[in-house]
Amino acid sequence: MQPAEEVTVQNARIAKKRNFILQNFRGETVRITLWGEAATSFEDSKIQSVLSPVFVALTSLKVKQYQGYTPTCFI
């Protein structure tokens, strides 16, 4: 988990974001970026104190890249 940071979006506004790297039992990873309130609505110390394994369910995501490819459509 990386700390929340402020970034400039489309040269117009400043938004907060936080990146997470999730890893499964096989060592495969995926980067998840949370934006706005979702990026800052929890305490870092509480997340870091959770014991493994942790199961995560993510909804309402926008996939920008999958296995090195940028998807053009979704089924």
Image: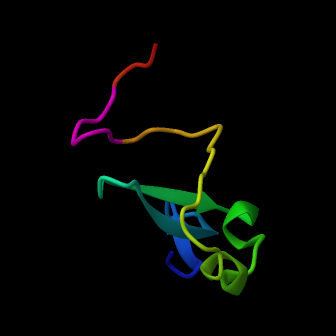
Q: Is residue 25 left or right of residue 1?
A: left
**Span shown in magenta:** 65-71
Residue extending farthest to the top is: 75
Residue 47: image location, x then y, percent? 66, 75
Specify the quadrant of the image occupied by residue 39: bottom right
Q: Is residue 24 left or right of residue 26?
A: right
Which residue sits at x=30%, y=52%?
Answer: 26
Q: Is residue 60 left or right of residue 42?
A: left
**Residue sitting nearer the eye, 49 or 16:** 49
Residue 63: image location, x then y, percent? 45, 38
**Residue sitting nearer the eye, 34 or 42:** 42
Residue extending farthest to the bottom is: 45
Q: Is 69 within the magenta?
A: yes
Specify the quadrant of the image occupied by residue 3: bottom right
Q: Is residue 21 left or right of residue 54?
A: left
Which residue sits at x=55%, y=68%?
Answer: 52
Residue 10: image location, x then y, percent? 50, 58
Q: Magenta stretch mostly in which secondary structure?
A: loop
For residue 75, above or below residue 49 = above
Which residue sits at x=57%, y=40%?
Answer: 61
Residue 28: image location, x then y, percent? 30, 53
For residue 57, above or below residue 13 = above
Which residue sits at x=23%, y=36%?
Answer: 69
For residue 71, above or below residue 32 = above
